[in-house]
Image (cartoon, grey):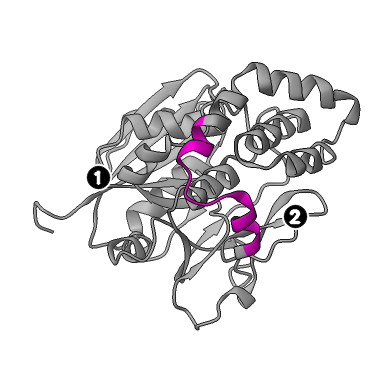
Amino acid sequence: MSSNDPLVSVIFPVKNEGIHVKNTMDSLQKAKTNVSYEVIVVDDASEDGCCDFLSAHEYPFPVTLVRTKGLGASNARNAGAEKANGTYYIFCDAHLFFEDYWIDKCIEPIEKGMADGVVPGIAPHDKPNTVGYGYTINLEKFKASFNGKSILTKGLHPVETPFLPGGCLAITKKVFDDIGGFDKGFIVWGHEDVEISLKMWLFGYKCYVQPQVKVLHVFRKSFPYKVSVTHADYNMMRMAYSHFSEERIEKCKKYIRVPEKTEQIVKAVIANGAMEQRDRYFARRRFDDDWFFKHFKINF
């Protein structure tokens, strides 16, 4: 590597991950790459000491540990980006297994000018041949779901995807900064990857899946921290007010899983600046949400 080669910042938000953090770091260390990279671990108020091993373990790449006080999934990622030095950021869950040259292949479509954000194929660690290729939206529950092989219209060439799964998401620092990162008004967990992908497309950037590489993901049966459906529904409505037409906002209200909390959630979203954000976003976006859903043939 020459001094002119770009640095990649691999950013792990972490909360009560147990042994997964060490397993992920060990897998990262073993994976071959021709890319220079650093690691930023954001320990977002873990209570299980899952990052304590880092102080006594040396890796062949720089590791920065950031301690935060319960920022939630969106802002923990933003906190990691604030400490990053890379030209590219790759946001990763802390329960992954990597293959050789995964970093190289993830940033390749960006370096070629094809994409601004990229995800690899993602498969369960215990079902490595069941690969998801980026996200679409399941309109029965307004929930992100993986695209299948049918999205790969040209073999294993990179292809557009509506949404980038946050489990392993590469983006340039330049684009990340330009769009304002992950939504700073999101709480706890839910829709942060959907929102940033939507924002990228509407602002004129491109999201691609790179099917020439995959990472293995430990899909847990439960969260290691408290998550409420109200948190995710709040984030959904903040996204809706930030990006959607009034008609789609009304549709999103019907997805709120505790209907009697609809008014409370909407009031909180508006009180926390969603309408002001909407005005800013609408003023600068290149495409509207009609274009987005038509482009990806999503009937919403």
Q: Which quadrant of the figure contains the C terminus?
A: bottom right
Give the answer, above or below, for where 7 lies relative to 104: above
273 versus 87 height, above or below: above
Residue at (53% x, 60% y) in the render: 216
For image coordinates 74% across by 19% down, the residue present is 267
The residue beneath circle 2 is 300
Image quarter of residue 1: bottom left
Question: Counting residues from the N terminus, which is met first, the one under dot 1 or under dot 2?
Answer: 1
Mark 1 = which residue?
61
The segment highlighted magenta reads 280-294
Residue 139's spot in the image, x, y percent? 78, 54
**Total marks in image:** 2
Q: What percent of the width, then of the height, locates residue 259?
A: 89, 31
Q: Nearer the viewer, residue 218 or 174?
A: 174
Residue 182 screen position, x and y as percent: 49, 36
- The kind of residue tagged 1 is Phe
Query: Label 2's element?
Result: loop
Can see residue 64? Answer: yes
Residue depicted at x 85% and y 36%: 257
The chief SS type of the magenta part is: helix
Dot 1: what SS?
loop
> Relative to 181, is 282 on the left or the right?
right
Q: Magenta stretch: residue 287 in it?
A: yes
Quadrant hosting residue 290: bottom right
Q: Check disc 2: other Cα within 10 Å, few if <14, some if 14-19, many if 20+.
A: some
Q: Is residue 247 above or below residue 104?
A: above
